[in-house]
Image (cartoon, rainbow, N blue to C red):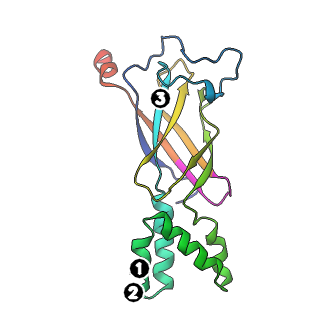
């Protein structure tokens, strides 16, 4: 993925979301970003579903294997890369290899990744770090965002940076208002 490209993620705004209701989080005397005190039913809360699987990364590893192995071995790895065990086996194989160009790839071949979270919007609260336990899973990670702004969310940019700095995920969050809001507006 290019440095400036983003993957679009549609974010459904829950029907109870409101700009006019008061925040119900227990955040008195605490910084706005203290996500330990967030109430997930607060009228300012939005949950972003981020895919665990980093398809771009897995596809890049597949391409690397395809050009560096024979067809029979590629078929083996192609099936195995969809599971955490496949990344583990490949990582150990590369670590034990004497080929020096393989070494930079070893760091990204771990199924559990801790990410630093950044949202390019000054008026939101969110956890500063998250851990994905299985980046080969087809499930989603539910990232809570507390919308502190007085304007309705339309778009925001989310960046997840792996703690080892070898992986960066970039998402453009496109907020989809609830049907009730659309009906009232039009």
Query: For mark 3, what is the residue?
Result: 46
Give percent across and percent down for residue 117: 61, 42
**Lower position in the chain sequence, tag 2 or tag 3:** 3
Q: Is residue 56 magenta?
A: no
Whether 132 is drawn above or below 34: the answer is below
Give percent across and percent down for residue 47: 47, 33
Q: How far apart are the alpha carbons under marks 3 and 1?
A: 41 Å
Whether 177 is drawn above or below 60: the answer is above
Crowding at dot 3, Cα within 10 Å, few <14 / some 14-19 / many 20+, comes out as many
Residue at image x 30%, y 24%?
Answer: 179
Q: Which mark is residue 61?
A: none
Q: Which structural element holds mark 1?
A: helix
Q: Which structural element holds mark 2?
A: helix
Q: Specify start and end residues of the magenta stretch as a single range.
A: 162-170
Q: How many marks?
A: 3
Q: Is residue 168 magenta?
A: yes
Residue at image x 46%, y 73%?
Answer: 62
Whether 106 is drawn above or below 145: the answer is below
Query: For mark 1, what is the residue?
Result: 76
Give percent across and percent down for residue 33: 65, 28
In the picture, measured across the screen, residue 116 lies left or right of residue 146, that is: right
Give percent across and percent down for residue 133: 54, 52
Crowding at dot 1, Cα within 10 Å, few <14 / some 14-19 / many 20+, comes out as few
* Quadrant for the C terminus in the image: top left
Query: For mark 2, what is the residue?
Result: 72
Q: How far apart are the alpha carbons under marks 2 and 3?
A: 46 Å
2 and 1 marks in contact (CB < 8 Å): yes
Whether 173 is drawn above or below 165: the answer is above
Q: Which structural element holds mark 3?
A: strand
């Amino acid at each position: 993925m290019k440095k400036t490209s983003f993957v679009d993620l549609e974010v459904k705004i829950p029907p109870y979301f409101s700009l006019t209701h008061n925040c119900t989080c227990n955040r008195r005397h605490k910084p706005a970003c203290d996500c330990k005190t967030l109430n997930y039913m607060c009228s300012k809360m939005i949950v972003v579903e981020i895919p665990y699987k980093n398809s771009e990364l897995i596809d890049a590893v597949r391409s690397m294997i395809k050009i560096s192995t024979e067809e029979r071995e590629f078929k083996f790895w192609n099936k195995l890369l969809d599971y955490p065990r496949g990344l583990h086996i490949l990582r150990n194989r590369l670590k034990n290899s004497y080929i020096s160009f393989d070494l930079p790839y070893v760091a990204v071949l771990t199924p559990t990744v801790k990410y630093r979270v950044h949202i390019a919007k000054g008026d939101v609260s969110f956890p500063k770090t998250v851990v994905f336990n299985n980046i080969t899973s087809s499930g989603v990670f539910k990232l809570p965002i507390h919308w502190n702004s007085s304007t309705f969310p339309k778009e925001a940019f989310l960046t997840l940076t792996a703690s080892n700095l070898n992986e960066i995920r970039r998402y453009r969050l496109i907020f989809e208002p609830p049907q009730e809001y659309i009906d009232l507006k039009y």
